[in-house]
Image (tube, rainbow, N blue to C red):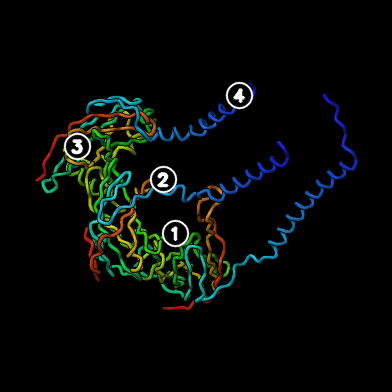
Amino acid sequence: MTRLAWIAITLLLLLATVGLDSHLDIREVMRDREWFLTRTGPEGAELQGVRGEVKAITAIIAQDAPDRALVHVRLGLAGPKEAREAWVDCRVSLRDGQNRVWLPLHANAADKMIEMLAPDGVNNRLCGPGLEVAQADRTIVSDQLFLVPVAVTEELTVHVSGFGTRPEALAMKVAPSIRMLP
Amino acid sequence: MSRGAALAAVLAGVVLLGGMMNTKPDYNSTFQPFVTNTNPGEEGMGRLFTARITEAHIASQIEFDHWGEQLRRDSAGVFLIVRLSASGTARSTRLTAIWLGASGRQYSVSSRVELPSSGIEYKWFQPGLFQRAVAVFELPEDEIKGGRLALMAAGDARLDSAVQIPLQTLGPKQDVTRIGP
Amino acid sequence: MSETVPPSLTRRIWMRIFAATGVIAAVVASYWIKVDNARQPEEPPATAFGQPVDTGRALLTPRALFVLSADPGDPGVEPGTKLLALTARIENITSQTQSVIFASPPMAATGDLELAEPEVILDRDGEVLQQLQPRLPEDVTILWTLPGTWEAQQVEITFFAQIFKLRDNLYGQSNWLGTYPAGSLLATPEISS
């Protein structure tokens, strides 16, 4: 009987060690993954004190490359300073029905294209830095450009999360307006 | 248990432990990427990308545009130019290309040939879209025959997938290859 | 509480002898390490032009040392700046492309003055050397900026080698670790116009 108790105690301590040891790793994974989604339409919702919305989304298709579309997403984030600071950063991605992930284009060419494609000709830059410094009473607008196959433009969801909100994220189902370029 | 049996048990334990210690795979082989060998000319599938070699040839010199300036590079060996077509699968991905030479040496993409608009190390590969890219290696000519192209998702390749593709055909050797944008 | 029987006299003597031997051994060993360190000279071995120095990742063969005037066309260069130039051949002796050419760059000292970190130029391109491919030796020029007050005199250049461990002490993975002086070159630079 005492022998069994010892074995039980050993197993318990082993489990506790594994739990403590993996605790930090699990937290690190959670800060990177978007597991708990608040699903809305483009009008968005509030996530940990910051309201996110898709202000405009356009898919641009060029005649000479009809299989792919450039998707311009203009995002608005608004909330009190503390809540924005608690987001730390801002990650925007596009997903389709199969949960494939498209990340924003980073090239210099993308910046110029946003200026050309945005309705007002202004590029507000990627969501991320500036989230915590901007004025409290102003909606922070950001512009990002994605390259996706034309076939998925009808099933796109805009995902937005911050380091501080993950594993929670906003998932906004969108229907981009299509623009054909000659 | 007799003293002899106890001694035998301890000795057996020592031998077993010694055997385990000496045959245990080391860190480098434990954490190396999972390699997928692809037949020449076929499409290689990694965890996050799929890629195919479309053309390869050797050149003595390379000419390219560098911020509006024409640069020409020569080499003590040769340049191996590998053109490929790749796409992301699960997410937008960047790739790293390495030439595994015939002697077993590993050649990274040459940083002497900067190709911001077509170089493989600058490109993002989007899911569902094939994009062309070029990888330029600088190496001795005898490393090419019998060598393979290795492709990995950029960043930490440990325990991730690596695709190895041998060349199907090697185009005729050129004196100067011009790589446009 | 059971009563403890005190150990016999011989047993106590033996125990003290063992303890004392340990302490004496430790003192002698640490003293010998100090003596041995003092016996070994700190200076790296002398090397000469044309003699290769193993820097761990590469073999570096110094060829010539001279002083030249900086190109006045270079941006950020003050007119009249003098450069100390060491031409050398360098070959990657590892099995991989190396982008870290020197873990610790060669150090040049003249008189009491240590010169700032040099630039390594690939002669073929006239640009900063970024990579070394295995089996492709290259000619390079290592350039130090000399102070305006510098006068022609002997220069000492120290080369460093980086330690490679096939199995490091932490994970047993292969790793490049610290550096140590591997060669020292004493020469008076030629003055070229």
Q: Nearer the viewer, mark 2 or mark 1?
A: 2
For marks 2 and 3, give the CA distance. 31 Å
Element type at mark 4: helix
Q: Are marks 3 and 4 in contact (CB under 8 Å)?
A: no
- Above or below for B175 versus A140: below
Q: Are marks 1 and 3 on the same chain?
A: no
The reply to whether residue C116 is visible in this rendering is no
- Which amino acid type corresponds to the residue marked 4 in the rendered image? Leu
Would you name the residue on which mark 2 appears?
Answer: B159
The image shows residue C184, relative to residue B20, as above or below, that is below
Q: Which secondary structure, mark 2?
A: loop
Residues marked 1 and 3 touching at CB (< 8 Å) = no
Which residue sits at x=17%, y=31%? A175
Label 3 element class: helix
Position of residue B57 relative to residue A78, above or below, is: below
Residue located at (25% from left, 71% from top): B175
Which tag is nearer the camera, tag 2 or tag 3?
2
The chain letter for the residue carrying disc 1 is: C
According to the picture, the residue beneath numbered tag 4 turns out to be: A4
Query: Mark 1 belongs to which amino acid?
Result: Val
- Amino acid at circle 2: Leu
